[in-house]
Image: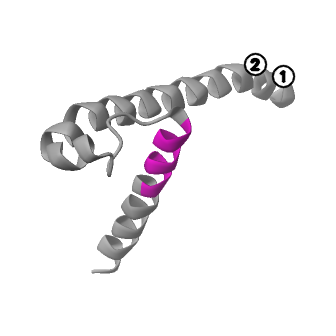
Amino acid sequence: MKKNWLLAIFPGALALMIISLVVALLIVKLLWAWTIPDLFPGAVEQGLIARSISWLTSLKVAILVAVFAGIAGVRKDRD
C-alpha cells in the first residue's frame, strides 16, 4: 500500500519541483533585465555587463544565490 501511495505522489512532486525551478529562473532573468541596466548603464553600453542573461546563466546565478543563502543560514544557526 505504501509503494502505491509513493508512486502516486511522485509525478506531482516532480512537476511541482520543475515548475518551481522555471519560476525561479524566470524571476532571476526578469530581475537582471530590470535592475542591471539601471544600476550600471555605462557598463552595459560598453558591453562590460550583459543587458540580459540566458536561461543557463540564470540557473548559475540562482545556484550561487542558493549557496550564499545556505551559508548564511548555517552561520545564523550557530549564533
Q: What label sits on residue 77 in the rendered view?
A: none
Query: In the image, which is nearer the foreground, mark 1 or mark 2?
Result: 2
On the image, numbered disc 1 is attached to which residue?
4
Q: Is residue 63 above or below residue 13?
A: below
Q: Which residues are magenta?
A: 56-64
Q: Horizontal and vertical percent for residue 52? A: 37, 33
Most extreme residue toward the front is 46
Q: Residues within 10 Å of mark 2 (few under 14, many from 20)?
A: few
Q: Assign the C terminus to one quadrant of the image.
A: bottom left
> Magenta stretch mostly in which secondary structure?
helix
Question: Quarter-wise, where is residue 39 in the image?
Answer: top left
Determine the residue positioned at 40% across, 54% down. Answer: 65
From the viewer's perspective, is 24 left or right of 5? Answer: left
Determine the residue positioned at 43% across, 33% down. Answer: 24
Q: Amino acid at mark 2?
A: Ala
Q: Is residue 74 above or below residue 39?
A: below
Q: Horizontal and vertical percent for residue 37? A: 20, 38
Work out whether residue 54 or residue 21 is closer to the camera in this orientation and state it. 54
Work out whether residue 20 or residue 45 is closer to the camera in this orientation and state it. 45
Q: Are marks 1 and 2 in contact (CB under 8 Å)?
A: yes
Determine the residue positioned at 77% across, 28% down. Answer: 6
Q: Amino acid at mark 1?
A: Asn
Q: Assign the N terminus to one quadrant of the image.
A: top right
Q: Horizontal and vertical percent for residue 71? A: 41, 69
On the image, numbered disc 2 is attached to which residue?
8
**Disc 1 element:** helix
Q: Is residue 68 above or below residue 75?
A: above
Q: Is residue 16 above or below residue 71?
A: above
